[in-house]
Image: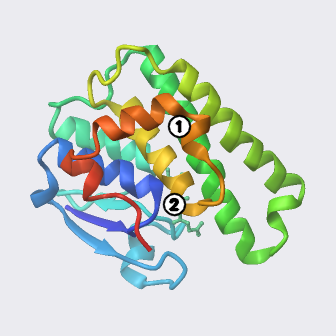
């Protein structure tokens, strides 16, 4: 398999974390690309020009992080990242909403330097703050439990906000997610995929 990736994307990160958790990293060649550079092999894999994009063992070109995770779950069912539990899926949904909003701000700034304070930017900031707060409240007290999509996405969301918006105190806003993240800090899937410039 081949994974088109970059070292900062939270969508890429949930795929890379899953590959490590499932022991599939050696089955994948990871190619870092600049999603804005119109690399032809990358565009062949995903005409949307967005990372992640996976080329499967059969040569199928698969975009979209959650679809890639679904495929990896079929390739290597254990350990499962999709537990099927609605509460866990809801937490994953909140976390993905948070980092999707954060990515929208970073990308919005490319065409509008004042994106953050406009109609869309303001709404995305609200999503980041409110989504993180609700996720923090929604995580069951039993976590750390299974290292499933809820945990993977929650860790990814918090780390991405801290990485991209370091002037704000995200950890204080989400103390339970911060504790969860710290509890897993030494896990290879967490430490080796942390966003870096
Ligand atoms: N819905 C997509 C979102 C992927 C995405 O937004 N990737 C960003 C990096 S975080 C990207 O490649 N952006 C380039 C672009 O928007 O053209 C997924 O789940 O994979």
Up the image or down, 47 lies above or below 73; here it is below
Q: Name the quarter where the N terminus is drawn.
A: bottom left
The reply to whether residue 63 is in sight is: no
Contact? badges 1 and 2 (CB < 8 Å): no
Relative to 195, is 116 on the left or the right? right
Nearest to N terminus: mark 1 or mark 2: 1
| Mark 2 lies within 8 Å of ligand 1 (Cβ measured) | no
Write down the residue under mark 2.
163
Q: Splitting the image into 4 quarters, where does residue 33 fall?
A: bottom left
How many residues crowd mark 1 within 10 Å: few (<14), some (14–19), many (20+)? many
Give percent across and percent down for residue 42: 40, 75
Q: Is residue 83 visible?
A: yes
- Label 1 and label 2: CA atoms lie apart by 15 Å
Q: Quadrant of residue 155?
A: top left
Please report the residue visible at 65 percent of the width from the left and 60 percent of the height from the top: 167
Query: Helix or strand or loop: what does disc 2 sit on?
Result: helix
Where residue 53 sits: x, y (%)?
Answer: 38, 61
Residue neighbourhood size for the residue with mark 2, other residues' Cα within 10 Å, grouped as few (<14), some (14–19), many (≥20): some
Residue at image coords 11%, 46%: 23
Q: Nearer the viewer's eye, disc 1 or disc 2?
A: 2
Pick whichever, 186 or 157, lies toward us.
186
Question: In the rendered view, does 153 fall on the left or right side of 183?
Answer: right
- Residue 189 placed where, x, y %? 24, 49
Coloring basis for residues: rainbow
* Residue 3 coordinates in the image, percent (x, y): 29, 64
Dot 1 corresponds to which residue? Answer: 95
Where's the C terminus, which quadrant?
bottom left
The residue that appears at 63% across and 30% down in the rendered structure is: 133
Left or right of residue 95, residue 148 in this image: left
Residue that appears at 41% across and 30% down: 150
Number of numbered callouts drawn: 2
Check disc 1 and report its element: helix, strand or loop.
Answer: helix
């Amino acid at each position: 398999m081949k994974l088109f990736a970059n070292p900062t994307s939270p969508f890429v990160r949930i795929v890379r974390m899953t590959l490590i958790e499932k022991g599939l990293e050696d089955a994948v060649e990871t190619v870092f690309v600049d999603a804005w550079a119109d690399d032809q092999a990358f565009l062949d894999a995903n005409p949307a020009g967005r990372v992640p994009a996976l080329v499967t063992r059969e040569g199928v070109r698969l975009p979209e992080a959650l679809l890639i995770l679904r495929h990896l779950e079929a390739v290597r069912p254990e350990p499962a990242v999709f537990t099927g539990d609605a509460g866990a899926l809801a937490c994953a949904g909140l976390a993905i909403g948070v980092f999707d909003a954060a990515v929208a701000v970073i990308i919005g700034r490319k065409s509008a330097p004042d994106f953050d304070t406009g109609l869309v930017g303001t709404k995305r900031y609200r999503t980041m703050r409110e989504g993180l707060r609700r996720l923090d409240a929604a995580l069951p007290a039993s976590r750390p439990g299974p290292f499933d999509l809820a945990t993977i996405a929650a860790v990814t969301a918090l780390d991405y906000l801290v990485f991209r918006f370091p002037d704000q105190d995200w950890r204080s806003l989400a103390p339970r997610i911060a504790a969860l993240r710290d509890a897993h800090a030494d896990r290879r899937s967490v430490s080796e995929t942390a966003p870096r410039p």
